[in-house]
């Protein structure tokens, strides 16, 4: 089974910074994509940023230039550096990995428990 554990959420003033971290454990076969999603009350969960095992990144337009995603393949960790935070970034942030546990096994989405990020104006 794959488990994701997030850390780093909290309360910050607008313009401030936070760094989220996520550690994945379990039998993850090489090649998984890792990413961060967020979900505000009453809204759908949306992609914030993702990164492939090869280092290719993808960002939501709303965070481009402010957020940076990175990963350590050897440790199966992913980080999200969030700068110039805005009140509209307030949300629960979820770590995600799209992974398989064997070479020929099916790909699945796995999720962390979520961490709250609150940006005050």
Image (spheres, rainbow, N blue to C red):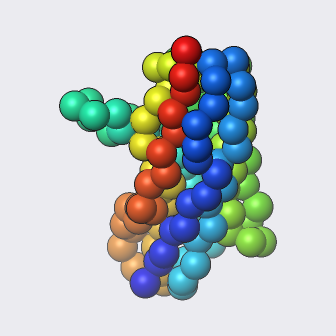
Q: Where on the picture, by quarter, is residue 26?
A: bottom right
Which quarter of the figure is the C terminus placed in? top right
Q: Which residue is rendered at x = 58% and y = 37% of the image?
A: 11
Q: Residue 97, percent across and down?
A: 49, 60
Give the residue at the far top of this rendering. Answer: 121
Q: Which residue is rendered at x = 63% and y = 19% of the image?
A: 14
Q: Residue 100, percent across and down?
A: 46, 73
Q: Which residue is rendered at x = 61% and y = 58% of the image?
A: 7
Which quarter of the figure is the N terminus placed in? bottom left
Q: Where on the picture, by quarter, is residue 58?
A: top right
Of 31 and 38, the residue lying toward us = 38
Give the residue at the far left of this rendering. Answer: 42
Q: Is residue 58 above or below residue 106?
A: above
Q: Is residue 14 above or below residue 98?
A: above
Left or right, 45 with respect to 21, comes to left
Q: Residue 50, percent across and down?
A: 57, 43
Please state the total of marks drawn on the protein image. Answer: 0
| Residue 13 in sight | yes
Q: Is residue 85 above or below residue 1?
A: above
Left or right, 11 with respect to 71, comes to left
Q: Is residue 91 above or below residue 72?
A: above
| Residue 55 in sight | no
Q: Which residue is rendered at x = 56% and y = 60% of the image?
A: 6
């Amino acid at each position: 089974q794959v488990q994701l554990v997030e850390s780093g959420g909290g309360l910050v003033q607008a313009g401030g910074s936070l760094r989220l971290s996520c550690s994945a454990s379990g039998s993850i076969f090489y090649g998984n994509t890792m990413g961060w999603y967020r979900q505000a009350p009453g809204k759908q969960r949306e992609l914030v940023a993702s990164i492939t095992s090869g280092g290719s990144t993808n960002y939501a337009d709303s965070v481009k230039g402010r957020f940076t995603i990175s990963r350590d393949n050897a440790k199966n960790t992913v980080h999200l550096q969030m700068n110039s935070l805005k009140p509209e970034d307030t949300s629960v942030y979820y770590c995600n990995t799209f992974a398989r546990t064997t070479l020929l096994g099916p790909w699945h989405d796995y999720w962390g428990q979520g961490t709250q990020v609150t940006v005050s104006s």
